[in-house]
Image (cartoon, grey):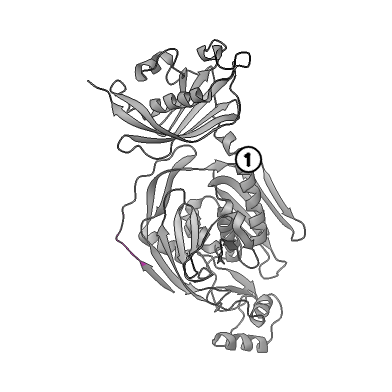
Amino acid sequence: MRLCFFSTFVPRMNECNTTMNSQQHTLAAPITISGVGIHTGQSVTMTLEPAEPSTGVVFQRIDLEGAPSVKADVDFVTETNRSTTLSNNGATVHTIEHLLAALAGCEIDNVLVKLNGAEIPILDGSSQPFIDAISEVGRKQQDAIKTWYTIEHNIYFTDEEKNVEMVAMPSHQYRINTLIDFNSPVLGTQHASLSGLSDFNTEIAPCRTFSFFHELEFLLKNDLIKGGDLNNAIVVVDKPVTDAQLETLSQKFGKEKFEITSEGYLNNLKLRFPNEPARHKLLDLVGDLSLVGFPFKAHIIANRPGHASNVAFAKKIKEHIKKTRFKQNVPVYHPDKPPVHDVTEIEKILPHRYPFLLVDKIIELNETTIVGVKNVTYNEPFFQGHFPGNYVMPGVLQVEALAQCGGLLAIPKNTEDKYDTYFLKVDNCKFKQKVVPGDTLLLKMELKNPIRRGIVEMRGTIFVGSKLVCEADLTAQIVKRPN
């Protein structure tokens, strides 16, 4: 194994956390790791490089023509036999789960993984070498918001044939409880738990993969673990084994004759934890669930997990988040609560007046997010000429309402009488349904990146009740008013 680090230390930026948001992170410097793939036996060198915000984890096969890449996403999983494999655009990468678990444990959101082979190096069979390498260079905070998603209700997955049961329950923490039961007198029933990602590096990352002796013999005979050397796997011996079998195994790996410990393990390795096999299954689960593609928080309970079940479960979680993510962004509006700014205070900040002031009050305001309210009535002047008899609020005015709300977020505090905001462009604008008299618009604007040199990039959404009616990306410039 060879670990190489480039660049000097880069100081970590201060993190800014909100209720369900934080900053995205990438590596502070490139990392090069070399090793052997356990299944292919190929020597592989991979380099982990910093990536732009919202890139995610991308694997690139630089040994292939055109250097094709595949994103770490459950939609691109093509094989789950003994490990997790991704394939897309002609790029295939095997045994990704240990590296993905390490990136999740270190909360690295964006990284480009360049490989000159088809498989991630197995190293010691755990995530610890990857954790050590990432810790050496550190991580870098990026100018982009990381949105954590929660789930609305329990999500279940079962496989009766394999006796697998999994559930993801609503929680504001990322927690996992696992159980393994192979009907083995050596392993018995083992449990492992993770109370939060902050504990992953010490409690889960060092735990190595494991195999049963009888499985190991089969894999060797069929040349299915070309890169295994028994320094990267715990071997469970729960069936009678002859001296001849031990001798054959010893010769295969060029070792002195192996022995069986009193606990029922081959003496090639010493356990790092009494329940190391269960902890490793939890490690695999963390890596496989990162393929959901959305940062999410839930309490996961997994009985008898495996790669195939993990991936199927991840698909269900991803499907749920895609269906409900807009609902999770819906602001909570309590009309009886005093607003942050009422309309008279808004007039002191914005230059707009009737009939063009389109924000009635502000109900939420922090460093990155603002929520405003616009009550749409029959008396709006634009209804006189816009579809008379079929009153519809013009889409351009919906975007204007978002823009005014964004101006209230962007203008520096306590200098409201000195600055205006001028919007430069609108991208990805979509209108989902009509806005009609009687609707109450909830106008939500979120900073996509910190404000730099007076340029503000925001994501805007408008809700009526729990329904999304409009969304757009808006860019504005803060301009100082003339004296």
Observer able to see residue 306: no
Question: What secondary structure is marked by label 1?
Answer: helix
Q: Where is the N terminus found, in terms of image quarters? A: bottom left
Residue at the farthest right position: 161
Residue 278 in magenta stretch? no
Residue 7 in magenta stretch? yes
Q: In terms of secondary structure, what is the magenta stretch mainly?
A: loop
Q: Which residue is mark 1?
A: 323
Query: Is 93 placed above or below 454 here?
Result: below
Question: What segment is highlighted magenta in the picture?
Answer: 5-10
Q: Residue at x 54, y 87 (%)?
A: 254
Q: Dot 1 surroundings within 10 Å: few (below 14), some, or many (20 or more)? A: few
Counting the numbered discs, the total is: 1
Q: Is residue 403 left or right of residue 265?
A: left
Query: Is 229 placed above or below 110 here?
Result: below
Q: Nearer the viewer, residue 419 or 122?
A: 419
Residue 263: x percent and y percent? 62, 74
Of the residues shown, which amino acid type is indicated by label 1?
Answer: Lys
Observer able to see residue 187: yes
Query: Is 74 placed above or below 470 here?
Result: below
Residue 355: x percent and y percent? 45, 13
Q: Where is the C terminus found, in terms of image quarters? A: top left
Residue 127: x percent and y percent? 50, 64
Tell me where residue 327 sits by quadrant: top right
Q: Is residue 190 left or right of residue 429?
A: right
Query: Is 192 placed above or below 253 here?
Result: above
